[in-house]
Amino acid sequence: MKLLKSTLTQKAAMTMNHNSPDSTRRQFLTQQAPLATTVAAATLKAVHTQADEPQAKLVFGIVGCGGIMSLHVQGLVNRHDDVEIAWLCDVDDAQTERRSRFIRQEFQPQAPKRTRRYEEVIQDKNVDAIVIATPHHWHAPIALAAMREGKHVYIEKPISHVYNEGHAIIKAAKEYGCVVQQGSQMRNSPVTRKAEKLLKEGILGDIKVARAWTAETRSVSKPVADTAIPAGVDYDRWLGPAPKRSFNRQRFHSTWRMFQDYGNGEIGDDGIHDLDMAAWGLGVDRLPSQITARGSRMMLHGHASEYPDNMNVAYEYDDGRLLIYENYPFTAYGIHGFDNGNVFYGTEGYMIFSRRGAFSVFLGPKNKPGPTEGQEIRGSRGYAEHMHEFQTAIRKGTGTKANAQTAHYSCALVHLGEIAYRTQGRLDFDPSAEQFIGNDEANALLTKEYREPFGLT
């Protein structure tokens, strides 16, 4: 997504402007994105150079070869990571063909094996780890099967399609001793590390409220008729645990996100990134005790999506802290100049933070400007560092920042918010029992039915 123009107040805009008065912070970040990629590559190169002994090459299986996986594969290739891509798995043969051609040309002489069946990948004794970037409804079934075979898993966000899948992934990671990394890349950005140091030093005082938003433009996608299954596609396996139905191109590549059977709407797509960083900034180590949600069709009338085009959710924790999520479909100007971002409100000041690779601090009653991320790391999104941490954890048995438990705390916000929206709007939740209080309808939505034979076991 392109970075959006800043809409900060004049005072904040002047504070956040690191170039000339005519340039905006958002434009500057756009210009700095290539630099941030170079910085990340240089940092990782230094890490590899300083290694005391040669590393064993890790063998990867790639499951789900569409959209976001192209970034992961390109990253592995462009950084010359010490891995072998042994398998490519996708139910659409055209996707695996494109990835295979790129890998052969740019990375390794031997073409990866190709399959429509992830079972072949996880049963290969030579494979160390699986990178999963399928639609959400397949994340947990594939990850759990992989861990039962002793494979480490990098799972694109969210790790779970429904709440209870998070528990299953946490349990499997412990039982089988597998590394789990959710694709919340900003957890490992140098921008996040610098901001985290300031927060831990108490620059904002006690942080009481965290705010997250997804504020972008969206357009109407009208329903379309079912058609024949395209050649080279196994649509029954694409559906997998979801209910069986005829092929519909909106229930396939990219636009599957609009439907509850496969995705989690905006809050579980882009929103999970921003909820995750809100949980990070607030220091979330538990589940909320009260959830209030509302949503509506504000402007995308006739849209095929089963989700609202705008949504607001408030999560209250038992210690009084508050986390707020907002989603709007008309805000080309973003919020505080960012299409995706956060604000952390403390007793001494606040921090505007964005996963676009920036932050600014304002202190005291007069909003005195404080530290920013700085030019040298501006625009860093953490993709390279996040994948590097996953590989290091496999080799050395160290931890990951987006491990199964941490990921579950963030994914739970998606699921609890959606359940509140679909039921009473305001729900009380028992964090210990992990059940809604006095609401059987809501508790039933913590899990789902799986079409055989594509369940979790």
Image (cartoon, rainbow, N blue to C red):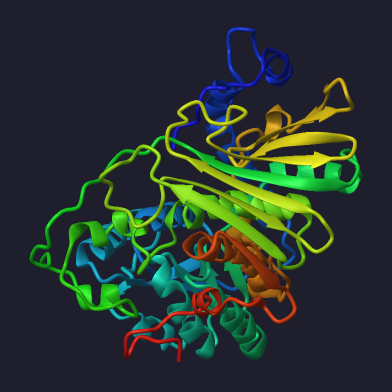
**Is 247 situated above or below 22?**
below
Viewer-closest of 330 and 290: 290
> Could you tell me residue 242's position as x and y percent?
32, 76
**Is 77 situated above or below 20?**
below
Mark yes or no: residue 329 visible.
Answer: yes
Quarter of image, res 379: top right
Mark yes or no: residue 47 visible.
Answer: no
Viewer-closest of 414 and 440: 440
Q: For the point 16% across and 67% down, which residue is it?
A: 247
User: Where is the N terminus found, in terms of image quarters?
Assistant: top left
Q: For the point 67% across and 44% down, which residue is it?
A: 211
> Could you tell me residue 84's position as x and y percent?
45, 69
Viewer-closest of 431 and 88: 431
Viewer-closest of 399 and 421: 421
User: Where is the C terminus found, in terms of image quarters?
Assistant: bottom left
Q: For the point 47% across and 31% down, which residue is it?
A: 331
> Could you tell me residue 263's position as x and y percent?
40, 63
Extreme residue toward the top, this view:
21
> Could you tell me residue 208's position as x and y percent?
82, 47
**Is 168 situated above or below 138?**
below
